[in-house]
């Protein structure tokens, strides 16, 4: 299998697994227990939090552990609305956000909140001017992601953060795609979320950074874990694995970016040059891994199926939206037509890919596109 869906999830790094194994076997104590087994796990959780805080460049008490990026987005948005203590107000979120944020915003509409969906420009960029236009006097929350999960387009989050800080608006930045690849915009936002399985860490574990002093309520009631803001037994092994994976990713980021970008660029160049009617979606600065390409006369789902039959794994958009019959909300918001959006395929490269795999994937893609077009 040639795996070109690294934006959906990544394989667990072997060194990360080694770091996790002791806490999945002999050191299995509940971190909340008062005995020696519990204290051993609790110390590991504290060490993981400290390591992540050092990498983020923040204080350990600003780091909260979650089940992943979806929970982080839900907690940030709904927690801010709950902290406001009222049933009315205004939320502004970009139209290209992950469904976790978009659906959370729609949930709050049922409680009387008004929502503005900020539209990107034709390149898929949310401009500071568009954010400024969307924010109102009663805006309590705004979300603009660091880089889009479908197109890889990087957003001007520092400028957006400065604008929102001046207006006193809570700014959540989804950094799920950028953790371990780019420097995180801590200091430019009120909160940001990451997910370990996007940078070769364990599935089902993430981090929510919340700036000290930010007004936010808990999402999950229960015990006193996470300083009383997120009940539930701490996942010691996953916390250790997340910290180890993030450290490895950050330390090797420059080399990985160069390798992955070279593979992606060579692949895209061949596709555009040798497959007629292929169009690269999204403009401006992008993550080194992403290539979102539309193919005239094709359906993206059909391309995905034929590539899968040839042992090549790709995506047509967000993994959390798999099975959706509607075209990508991201591409439609950029002003692309429905046919172009439905013909899009997302190729995302990772550190374990090779040039030989990229060549084989291109050959499989060319065959798939020609087969679909000939059938029509």
Image (cartoon, helix red, strand yellow):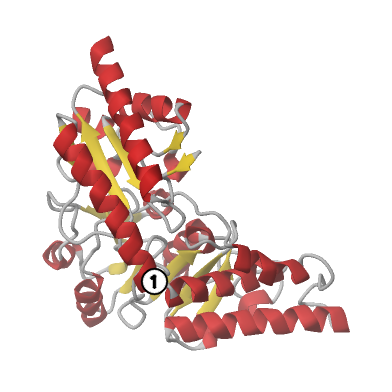
Residue 166 found in image quarter: bottom left
Give the percent coordinates (x, y) of residue 117: 25, 52
Q: Number of marks in the image?
A: 1
* Left or right of residue 240: residue 274: left
Give the percent coordinates (x, y) of residue 315: 39, 39
Q: What residue appears at the point 37 percent right and 27 percent down from the top-left corner? A: 301
- For the residue labelled by badge 1, is the local secondary structure a helix, a strand or a loop? helix
Residue at the outermost right position: 35
Which residue is more in the foreground, 50 or 70?
50
User: Pointer 1: residues within 10 angstroms few (<14), some, or many (20+)?
Assistant: some
* Left or right of residue 175: residue 70: right
Give the percent coordinates (x, y) of residue 206: 54, 65
Q: What residue appears at the point 61 percent right and 79 percent down from the top-left corner? A: 48
Give the percent coordinates (x, y) of residue 350: 42, 55
Residue 4 found in image quarter: top left
Q: What residue appears at the point 52 percent right and 61 percent down from the top-left corner? A: 200
Which residue is more in the foreground, 352 or 181?
352
Against 213, residue 183 (above or below) is: above
Image quadrant holding the C terminus, namely top left
Q: Residue at label 1? A: 253
Against 173, residue 283 (above or below) is: above
Residue at the outermost bottom position: 59
């Amino acid at each position: 299998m040639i795996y070109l869906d690294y934006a959906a999830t990544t394989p667990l790094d072997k060194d990360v697994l080694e770091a996790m194994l002791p806490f999945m076997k002999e050191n299995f104590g509940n971190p909340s227990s008062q005995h020696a087994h519990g204290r051993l796990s609790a110390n590991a959780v504290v060490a993981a939090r400290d390591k992540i805080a050092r990498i983020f460049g923040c204080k350990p008490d600003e780091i909260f552990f979650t089940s992943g990026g979806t929970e982080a987005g839900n907690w940030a948005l709904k927690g801010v609305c709950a902290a406001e203590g009222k049933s009315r107000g205004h939320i502004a979120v970009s139209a290209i956000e992950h469904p976790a944020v978009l659906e959370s915003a729609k949930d709050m509409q049922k409680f009387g909140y008004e929502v503005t969906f900020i539209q990107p420009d034709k390149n898929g960029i949310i401009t500071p001017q568009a954010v400024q236009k969307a924010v109102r006097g009663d805006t309590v929350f705004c979300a603009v992601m660091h880089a889009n999960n479908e197109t890889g387009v990087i957003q001007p989050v520092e400028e957006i953060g400065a604008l929102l800080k001046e207006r006193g608006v809570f700014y959540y930045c989804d950094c799920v795609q950028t953790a371990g690849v780019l420097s995180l915009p801590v200091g430019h936002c009120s909160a940001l979320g990451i997910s370990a399985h996007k940078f070769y860490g364990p599935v089902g574990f993430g981090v929510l950074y919340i700036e000290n002093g930010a007004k936010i309520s808990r999402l999950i009631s229960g015990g006193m874990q996470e300083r009383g803001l997120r009940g539930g037994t701490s996942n010691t092994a996953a916390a250790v694995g997340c910290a180890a994976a993030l450290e490895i990713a950050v330390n090797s980021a420059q080399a990985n970016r160069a390798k992955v970008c070279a593979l992606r660029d060579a692949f895209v160049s061949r596709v555009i040059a040798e497959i007629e009617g292929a169009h690269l979606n999204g403009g401006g600065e992008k993550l080194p891994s992403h290539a979102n390409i539309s193919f005239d006369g094709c359906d993206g789902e059909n391309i995905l199926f034929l590539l899968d039959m040839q042992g090549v794994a790709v995506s047509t958009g967000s993994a959390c939206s798999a099975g959706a019959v509607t075209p990508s909300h991201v591409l439609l918001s950029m002003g692309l037509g429905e046919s172009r959006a439905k013909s899009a395929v997302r190729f995302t490269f990772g550190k374990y890919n090779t040039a030989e795999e990229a060549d084989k994937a291109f050959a499989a893609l060319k065959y798939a596109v020609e087969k679909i077009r000939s059938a029509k």
